[in-house]
Image: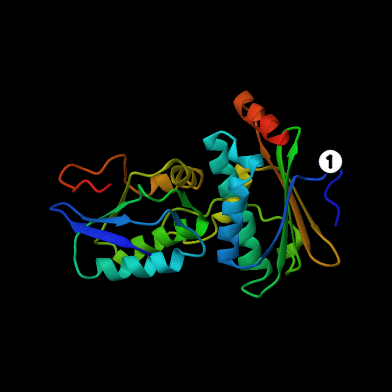
Amino acid sequence: MDLLAKPTPEHLVVQVLADRIDAAGAIRFKDGMREITQRSSGPVLLDLSQVRFLDSSGLGAVVAVMKLLGPDRRLELARLTPAVQKVFRLTRMDSIFTIHETLPEGAPHAR
Amino acid sequence: MPADAAVMPQQAPPLQLCLRADPLAVRHTLARVMADPLLARLDPDLRDRAEILLAEVLNNIVEHAYAGQPGPIRLCIGPNPTGLLILAEDEGRPMPAARLPPGDLPPLTGDLPEGGFGWCLIRSLATSLTYRRGPNGNCLTLILPINDSADSAGLARSQKN
């Protein structure tokens, strides 16, 4: 799964360049995130603006990424599309993650 | 295996598919179903709900009924007076205790769960769930309710196709 990482003063911003994180791609997403985040430290901001669909396996993979970052490294989410937002809301996982509607100031504007 | 007569539409369901129990086959099937006129013209919010619901139903069969083994899944989707009737059949293992999982939300404290969200999503999106274990496998039926008049109009339009 293609992931684009951009360090900013505040976060490592990682944009998912795939239109879905589903059961067929959840492990690749998790492995890709492990690889792309291990070369840096500090909080990670996951930009999900390209991800149109996420299922419960994809949700589990996002939780797994949060855990593999460890307790000292925060994972925040940004730019959830409507279907992804629904999955987070219905499972109340929107109460666990800090979710940004836009990329915070300072983050390069990925499209 | 017949579906529950009370919720089965009189006419044959307009969309019937058979797929392999495999995550990539589920992904391709969802793409095909979402492009079908039955779903393509629905309100975007309802389309999202339909895709999440179908994904969870099919993924559960792949992961639990077949547990990674190959096998067929039959899927029927048809209009119903209250929404879309979805029927899914497989020849895999029965549901634990031969009943539908409660779908309680896993506890979100302490060590966060990485799974167990599937039935919670299904139960929050669908109504009229039935499960039967037949001699050859499992049969699950459920309804994706359509409440809003715009949604109903979209469904009526797609039925004419």
For residue A81, side relative to residue A45 (left or right):
right
Residue A50 screen position, x and y as percent: 37, 49
To which residue does mark 1 refer?
B11
Which residue is at the far front?
A: B161
Which residue is at the far left?
A: A9
Quadrant including the N terminus of chain A? bottom left
Question: Which color scheme did the rendering employ for the protein?
Answer: rainbow
Would residue B81 be seen by someone viewing this image from the given angle? yes
In depth, the one of A87 and A83 nearer the eye is A83
What secondary structure is marked by label 1?
loop
Residue B27 screen position, x and y as percent: 55, 59
> Residue visible at 33% across and 44% down?
A79
> Label 1 amino acid?
Gln
In depth, the one of B68 and B27 nearer the eye is B27
Name which quarter of the figure residue B138 lies in. Answer: bottom right
> Residue visible at 67% across and 74% down?
B70
Would residue B111 be seen by someone viewing this image from the given angle? no
Residue B99 screen position, x and y as percent: 74, 57
Name which quarter of the figure residue B71 lies in. Answer: bottom right
Q: Is residue B47 above or below residue A37?
A: above
